[in-house]
Image: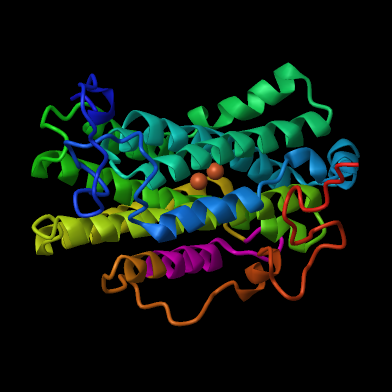
């Protein structure tokens, strides 16, 4: 499989017309030209993301460092934190790996290529956030390494990681030409697993730490996670948009069979999340958050994932099981944090004098 962006160019102008451009699998035009912009929402997403770029070292970590080094966390809380950051670090590596190795090869609209490059930069920034958190606790390389390794020791987490990897590899190893129904179908399944990651796995992971922060533990880490969450919301929106757009442009693919498949994948994601929760959260509930409530929340999120793809919700959870989580959403009216959480545009206060 060779991406059309890698075909040698030939003499002659091949600037696309808007009609010719396809979101994936387009051919016969020069992908390197930023005009015409066909998908204006996508360009807007890039411009918004650029305004909201942040860096982990903007968030002070002193309170968490003190808690970490003075035994303020119980054993169960420490275990939850370690497995959490271990899994999320792996996850924030997996997502850009998927984008660069599989998804990106198929994207044939310049504005989406531009935005996905930015998404990859944000994922790199998320990994930097996890590094910054552990470094700020004063952990040396050995101490950090033990934490990063942890997810590989837990079968439920290994299974969850491999689940996403399988879809990426299906796209990478697909011999069908880009733009063919077979190739787009493999891509679509990978994109649904990507969506489950961005829309379900990440926010649910953040919720574990928000539960600790709600009781006054690791609030600086939670603040880092709030910023990451804001990015992931955009990535997920874009993922859902991409899936729906492919369905519009390749209506034959989005048939009843594929819709059932999408539901099955969301359900598989939910099961992986449930197994993950049981592996890292004690049964009696950790700090007021019971595993049962967490699983209800996971189902609530899964239902919304179905709706966002135009599908009937799997579980029918009507009310939000953890409404307090909105306190950790940036741009929310009442903000939980006493710190410097702010709605800001990077660069807006730069002084060039
Ligand atoms: Fe991320
Ligand atoms: Fe993401």
Note whether 182 is above or below 203 in the view shown: above
| Percent position of residue 323, x then y | 61, 75
- Asked whether, in this view, residue 17 is left or right of residue 317, the answer is left
Q: Does residue 199 show up?
A: no
The residue nearer to you, when weighing 268 against 99, is: 99
User: Which of the image's four quarters has the C terminus?
Assistant: top right
The percent position of residue 46, horizontal first and vertical second, equals 51, 50
Magenta region, residue range: 285-303
Looking at the image, which residue is at 78% across and 60% down?
Answer: 342
Q: Is residue 104 above or below residue 304?
A: above
Q: Is residue 274 left or right of residue 340?
A: left
Q: Residue at x 41, y 77 (%)?
A: 317
Q: Quadrant of the N terminus?
A: top left
Q: Is residue 312 magenta?
A: no
Query: Where 141 falls versus 317 (above or below)?
Result: above
The quarter holding residue 131 reads top right
Q: Residue at x 49, y 81 (%)?
A: 319
């Amino acid at each position: 499989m060779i991406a059309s962006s890698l075909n040698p160019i030939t003499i002659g102008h091949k600037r696309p017309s808007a009609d010719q451009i396809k979101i994936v699998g387009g051919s016969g035009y020069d992908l390197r030209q930023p005009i015409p912009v066909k998908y204006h929402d996508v360009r807007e997403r890039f411009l918004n993301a650029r305004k909201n770029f942040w860096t982990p070292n903007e968030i002070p970590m002193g309170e968490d460092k003190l808690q970490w080094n003075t035994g303020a966390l119980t054993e169960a809380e420490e275990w939850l934190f370690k497995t959490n950051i271990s899994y999320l670090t792996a996850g924030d590596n997996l997502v850009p790996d998927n984008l660069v190795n599989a998804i990106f090869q198929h994207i044939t609209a310049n504005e989406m290529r531009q935005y996905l490059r930015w998404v990859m930069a944000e994922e790199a920034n998320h990994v930097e956030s996890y590094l910054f958190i552990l470094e700020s606790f004063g952990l040396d390389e050995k101490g950090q390494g033990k934490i990063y390794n942890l997810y590989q020791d837990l079968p439920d987490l290994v299974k969850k990681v491999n689940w996403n990897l399988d879809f990426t590899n299906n796209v990478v190893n697909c011999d069908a030409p880009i733009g063919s129904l077979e190739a787009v179908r493999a891509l679509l399944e990978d994109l649904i697993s990507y969506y489950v990651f961005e829309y379900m796995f990440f926010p649910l992971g953040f919720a574990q730490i928000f539960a600790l922060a709600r009781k006054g533990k690791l609030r600086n880490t939670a603040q880092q996670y709030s910023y990451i969450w804001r990015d992931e919301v955009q990535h997920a929106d874009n993922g859902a948009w991409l899936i729906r757009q492919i369905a519009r442009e390749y209506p034959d693919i989005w048939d009843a069979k594929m819709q059932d498949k999408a539901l099955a994948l969301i359900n598989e994601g939910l099961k992986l999340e449930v197994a993950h929760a049981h592996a890292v959260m004690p049964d009696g509930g950790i700090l007021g958050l019971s595993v049962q409530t967490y699983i209800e929340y996971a189902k609530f999120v899964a239902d919304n994932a179905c709706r966002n793809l135009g599908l009937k919700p799997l579980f029918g959870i009507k009310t939000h099981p953890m409404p307090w989580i909105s306190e950790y959403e940036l741009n929310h009216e009442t903000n939980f944090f006493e710190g410097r959480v702010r709605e800001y545009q990077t660069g807006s206060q730069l002084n060039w004098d």
